[in-house]
Image (spheres, rainbow, N blue to C red):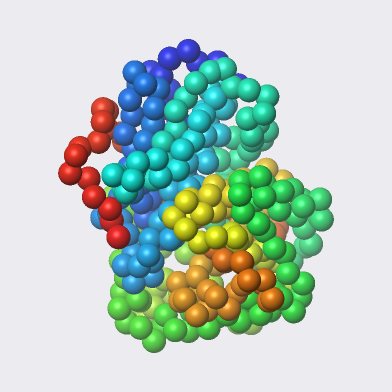
Amino acid sequence: MRTRTRLDSATVESLLAAAVAAPSIHNTQPWRFRVSPRDQLLEVHSAPERTLPLADPMHRAQYLSVGAAVFNLRLAAVHQGWRPEVRLLPDPHQPGLLATVRLTGPFGADDQPSDPGLHEAIARRHTSRMPFTGRPVPEPFVAEMAAAAHAAGARLHVPDVAGTRRLLRLTAAAEARNHTRPDRTAETRTWITAPGADTPYGIPVTALGPPDAAARMPMRDFVGALPALRLPALWFERHIQVALLWTSHDRRDDWLRAGQALQYVLLTATAHGLRTSLLHQAMEWPDLRAATALPGHRRCHPQMLIRFGYGPDGGRTPRAPGRWRPGPPPATETETS
């Protein structure tokens, strides 16, 4: 850990490099940054041009993505010796301003997370769409992942075998619906990039995973009816391990907290040598999302289904540089929804 006394350009670039390493739906990276070095303040705004109108009409997934970036930003600030003070949705007159992070120092002993292994995991975390080994993850690791979600204001439920099958069936049902909607397929395919394409957004074809030969794992089909891009099927793990991330409420600030919790869970898993992938399909259909909730739990609002285990590293996806704009936001900024 380094101790900083002022927010210079090098520090800002370091912080934003960590922020943009966060996962986002289809690697849309739906965030923008504004920085006030004088006030030692970083603002995180939504990016209206990088949304998914069909898959994410309420922008819930966008908020999760931004929340994950805020968590990385906060973690990097602690690593640099700053105490980050995070405010979610700080200004009702700027609905596109999703969070602010004010840096003060030095950080206190109660600032969490402080594990240096988590900061190191930022660069190593990649979504893996490949088959895992099926080797059981030790219970202490799973307990740490659940504790991470709880510390960030969410909950992580790890189901039994029957519960896992239920969640995977709902995910498969959502994927099947996507196949019947050409508009949804087209929207998803928009974010696939060809090898060598000069774009910092989207998912390269080389980072896509194969379908499961046994049809146990409902991975998202990004290529649709493009046989030239379809990979040969592989056998996925027989014993699939998943966890449901959920919150007690379902407001905009809950989505941002869920995004922070998601990243905390993913980095905790990465620090223990685990691989992860995100199953979001059922969350994109209101009835299927509701069906993934814990049975009998009235205040369970599902946010993400996480697959975890041991396996190969995921293919790297590009990132746009952490560009930032100095000074206050323009008065014309409006909400994206």
Where is residue 19, by image quadrant? top left
Spot occupied by residue 213 in the image (x, y as percentages of width and height): 60, 80
Q: Viewed as shown, does residue 8 lie left or right of 160?
A: left
Q: Viewed as shown, does residue 286 lie left or right of 321?
A: right
Q: Viewed as shown, does residue 331 lie left or right of 13?
A: left
Q: Is residue 247 above or below residue 119?
A: below
Q: Is residue 172 above or below residue 271?
A: below
Of residues 46 and 281, the one drawn nearer to the viewer in this rendering: 46
Q: Quadrant of the C terminus?
A: bottom left
Of residues 79 and 285, the one drawn nearer to the viewer in this rendering: 285
Where is residue 226, by image quadrant? bottom left
Q: Residue at x 81, y 50 (%)?
A: 140
Spot occupied by residue 212 in the image (x, y as percentages of width and height): 59, 76
Q: Viewed as shown, does residue 280 lie left or right of 242?
A: left
Q: Please identify the residue farthest to the right as the structure is shown.
A: 139
Q: Is residue 3 above or below residue 246?
A: above
Q: Residue at x 52, y 79 (%)?
A: 288
Q: Quadrant of the N terminus?
A: top right
Q: Is residue 322 visible?
A: no
Q: Please identify the residue farthest to the left as the structure is shown.
A: 332
Q: Residue at x 75, y 54 (%)?
A: 142
Total marks drawn? 0
Spot occupied by residue 307 in the image (x, y as percentages of width and height): 63, 63
